[in-house]
Image (tube, coloured by chain):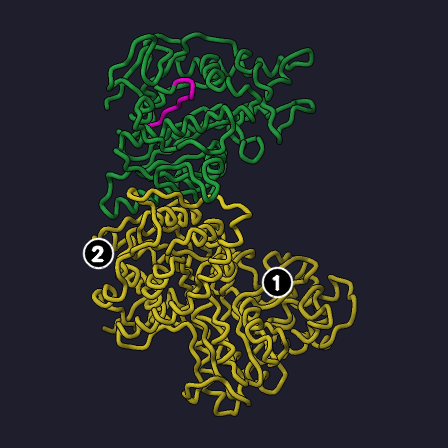
Amino acid sequence: MAKVHIPFMQTGALAVGGRLLDEDERSVQAWQDRPSTLTRGHRACQGCAEALAARWVLDTAMEVTGGKLMVANATGCLEVFSTLYPESAWRVPWIHSLFANAASVATGIAATNHAKGRDDIRVIAQGGDGGTADIGMACLSGMFERNDDVLYVCYDNQAYMNTGVQRSGATPPAARTSTTPAVGLSPGNTFGQGKFVPKIAMAHEIPYVATATVADLRDLEAKVRTAMKHRGARYLHILVTCPLGWGTKTAASIKMARLATQCGLFPVFEAEYGDITGVTPIRSRVPVEDYLRPQRRFAHLFGPRGDEAALERIRGQAERNIRQYHLLEEGVLA
Amino acid sequence: MLELLEGSKAVARAVALTRPDVVCAYPISPQTHIVEALSVMVRDGHLKDCDYINVESEFAAMSVSIGASAAGGRVYTATASQGLLYMAEAIYNASGLKLPIVMTVANRALGAPINIWNDQSDSLSQRDSGWLQLFAVDNQEAIDLHVIAYKIAEQISLPVMVCMDGFVLTHASDVVELPTQEQVDAFLPPLAPLEKLSLKNPRSMGMMAGPDVFTETKYLAHQAMIQAHTVIARAAADFAAAVGRESWRPVRVWGPDLEDRPARQGEIAVIGMGSVMGTTQAAAARLWEQGVKTRLITLGSYRPFPARTVREAIGTADRVVVLDRALMLGVGGVLSADVRRSMARLGIPMHSVVAGLGGRSITERSLAKTLRQAKVGELGELEFMDLKQDLVTMSDAAVPVRAPARGAARPGAAAAPAGAPGAEGPDDAAASAPGAPAAAADDAMPTKPAQTGGPALTASAGSLGTATADEKATSADGAAPAAGDRAAPTASDRREG
């Protein structure tokens, strides 16, 4: 199935607006016989956007590869909630080894498949932002540098949610975590230099890098399709809401991801061989406060004892993203 | 066909004969020559249908091996020392996942101080990792063992470390015989893993296991390790039959009388692993004529530990001497702890001789002296072979003398180092009492006159490797230090990652 652009904001699996989509325009999830790679019954929290994203990514990849897919998973929420022996929610050849090595394990799987002449079998590695941006960075960079035939998917919920919401290298500034508590003179996470892994991936000039969120699942599906068209190292970074860690309503996960993109704090784009090839522009810009205020992890920025200086710096980040990725310009739709 | 080959190159060719699907490694001395040779064989087409992967760390090397093995490939990697420690988390993971990976460990010391030379601290530090650890005495055994290791690993679905002494074997050229491709193919069938990532039968590997099943998982792993004894013995015998000559064995008992029997009264059982046993054999043969009768028990298998075979081989020996190439600080030899457990009820005295750490040569002469001491009952419970007493002794000027120590009369040995073995507790008082090792050092190494007056690296001023100029000034008798007398590495020393 070819990549299909649906130029509407709200699209379902089967229909867009009131119109039933043509069969080849429908999402994988529209089909009764969809792969259900991550099937029901697992132990993810209510409103977990990581479970949703993983299902869309892997179902799409299963469809693209005709079921010839193997998956290496880093330690983290996704691994823990899906597999407590003797139960497994995975309907795909799946391996969990360690926290830091999903990219390397995937490299090994691809190497054996290549040595045995089974290049039709594709490999996906996946992990959270801690397993990607922090502890797994060396393995990930090595996989990129060698251009191993692996798609690495990072489900970024912006902290170590599995161990109880500790700060990671991908935690945004000012966010309260259990190791950056909202107390003291500068509450919440520090304003560091940031560690936006998609840019690090682009610096390796690998064939394909993309970002996505659970707010636009059709876009996510399209990016998985594009990624699977390429051979070599590919990287997909998905912002996934975590109601537990962010302190948001479980019903608001999709909305929160959308607000992250519409305020400019999370740029959605794709890049090939180090150059940006497409950007999803902001459709209806919102102030960063609209995104931050509903999240308890940013509650200390608001109210009578709020932190206007921190908010100003966050606004600055959004402005910088908008400038850098041309998020408000016309004609840059991917 | 007999050939003169460097150990590493010979091992690389043996590995190639096993037709690996994936070879993956990160460079570290003294393992490098093996993987260099394999990379050439993959590039020039000598080793077909094999992916050679250059990784960014040992952790990645083991992780790639895990993935490649889980996908059903025959996988090879090699490391040593710091590299083994760097991959430690993945080592435990590989055995827990029951992946039949074979890895060469070119045994090397662990830092600090950084030291690239041979002892067995590295692989022995991973003794509880669930990997089999098989040791080669010489390069012929190292060659054979790599082929045998794959057979064992794949039959019981557990990973195997093939341990060979770094430099002493890896970089030594010896006349060896490689098995032919036909012999290896007949001995080692294509890999048919018990479990793998499979499209036909998609399974989840490496799932979380809760308290309800974790103990049982470990119990089964324990049983698998015990059952490995049988598989190891059969694989070794089958390989010897396949190549039609003597080959590696999990335990080898040898005496200069060439009688195939356990040790008996009047004899000393000497237990060790790796290349040191070759030197020991030479020493034992010479000593036999002098009335010091020994029986050498060479362990080819360290994990699983062949406790029963060792116990039987010890027989009714007068005493047991264990050559320890790795040290549990504050406790004693690593290997001797296993030996002690296996001979717990025999009531035979055991001596742990810590020897050859960080590449210190274990000479035939020192071995002979140790065994003679054992014969006459002068060997302590824990001894450090060829310990340079003058380098471990506090100088009077640097540190207030706490208590007079036995054997303190010797120049440069004014007091026992604080915290040194033997300085504390009645149990260890016999072990390495300052008197005995000092005498050993004297006999083993004809000491240069300057050496006794050389710098004493004091326990208070810093450990070996961080000696300062001040220590020279405060050495026992103020004599000028002898050039090159330092144990600490200098900038000009060969230092490879």
Q: In which quarter of the image is residue B20?
A: bottom left
Can residue B107 be seen at all in this image of the molecule? no
- Residue A213 magenta-drawn? yes
Q: In this view, does B128 lie to the left or right of B148?
A: right
Q: Give the range drawn in magenta.
A: A208-216
Residue behind mark 2: B46
Which tint was used for chain B? yellow
Identify the element where label 1 is drawn. loop
Q: Quadrant of residue A289?
A: top right
Could you say which chain is coloured green in the image? A
Q: Earlier in the sequence, mark 1 or mark 2?
A: 2
Residue B362, percent from left and from top:
50, 74
Residue B67, percent from left and from top:
37, 46
Q: In which quarter of the image is residue B471?
A: bottom right
The residue lying toward the viewer, choosing from B122 and B160, is B160
Residue B214, percent from left and from top:
52, 50
Residue behind mark 1: B329
